[in-house]
Image (tube, rainbow, N blue to C red):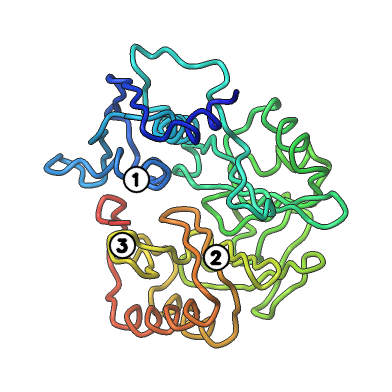
Amino acid sequence: MSTTQAAHESPAAEVRHDGWHVDDRCLNCNIARQVAPGMIAYKEGGEYGGLSTVIRQPETEADVEKLYMAAHACPTRSIHPPADEWDADSDPYPKPLDQDGVVYLCGHSSPQTYGATSYLLRRPGGSAMMIDTPRWRPALARRYEETVGKITDVLITHLDHVAHARKYADAFGARLWIHEGDLHSLPSADQVIRGTEPVEIGPGVVAHPFPGHTAGSTLFIADEKYCFTGDAFFWSNSQQTLEVAHSVVYDSIKTLAESVARGAEELTFEWVLPGHGDMHRLPADEMRQRMRGLGRRAATYPAEEIDYGAVRY
């Protein structure tokens, strides 16, 4: 019987694994708080407002699985099991986002992308795309293709998620995409998205230039359902709505607010899948209303100095 089956068949069984902890290398990338809610949360009162801490030890096998998800995604390897003894089969990645099995989480985030979440997108016919990239490991590249099929394209949302992009594209024999506004960060890109008009990357997958966070920020929307936003906007668990990281804007908060307002009228999707911040699903009409609200709020945000510690996801 699998661990998951056992957890489902004995939901009341308690399994104590005291000793899980987060060390002080935490980057405030938000991954751990997202995948292990209720167990990992903000550490209040520290010198740096974004640090995470374990607030509850696991009580069930399902809890343990979530903490291992967080540990294997953490870019600084800051999340530790008891006595640093790792179960040999504890790595769940790539992991399906939902029951549809179209989008997978790569896990294994890289400190060189500030711990950005990366994704695999399965396409009809057995191929797939990678959106932004995890830390580089040849074994991970092999595992991803074994799980989702031949990866034909690597899509980069913006300039500070380019680390490892060339290595993954070369390992897969894939085309590497970025917008011209951020091309200086990835001059070896094979395909350059130009201008402000949508570009079809493949059947059902459209790139939407979305300047603001950076000049070349780009959303990738698949099947009018999945929206990969990079760092353009995210679902805020603290605010329970869509939000932008207004203290981390490299281009222009005014331009970003305009992109959001325009996107609210032009884009259709159900899932917001960001590089940082929470993933969330809403009906497309409600997501559009949330985008409109964010556009109005973002238009009031002042330009700020870059401050990662000020972001509250």
Asked whether, in this view, residue 163 is left or right of residue 298, the answer is right
Residue appearing at x 45%, y 29% in the figure? 68
Of the two numbered discs 2 and 3 on the same chain, state the one appearing first in sequence.
Answer: 3
Q: Tag 3's secondary structure?
A: loop
Q: Looking at the picture, how far across and down is residue 235, in whole percent?
A: 41, 63
Contact, mark 2 vs mark 3 (Cβ under 8 Å): no
Residue appearing at x 33%, y 35% in the figure? 26
Residue closer to the observer: 9 or 62: 9
Estimate the spatial distance between the alpha carbons at disc 2 and disc 3, rounded to whole Å.
24 Å
Residue closer to the observer: 296 or 65: 65
Q: Is residue 236 above or below residue 87?
A: below
State the residue position of label 3: 247
Residue closer to the observer: 209 or 296: 296
State the residue position of label 1: 37
Of the two numbered discs 2 and 1 on the same chain, state the one appearing first in sequence.
Answer: 1
Dividing the picture into quadrants, the one containing residue 64 is: top left
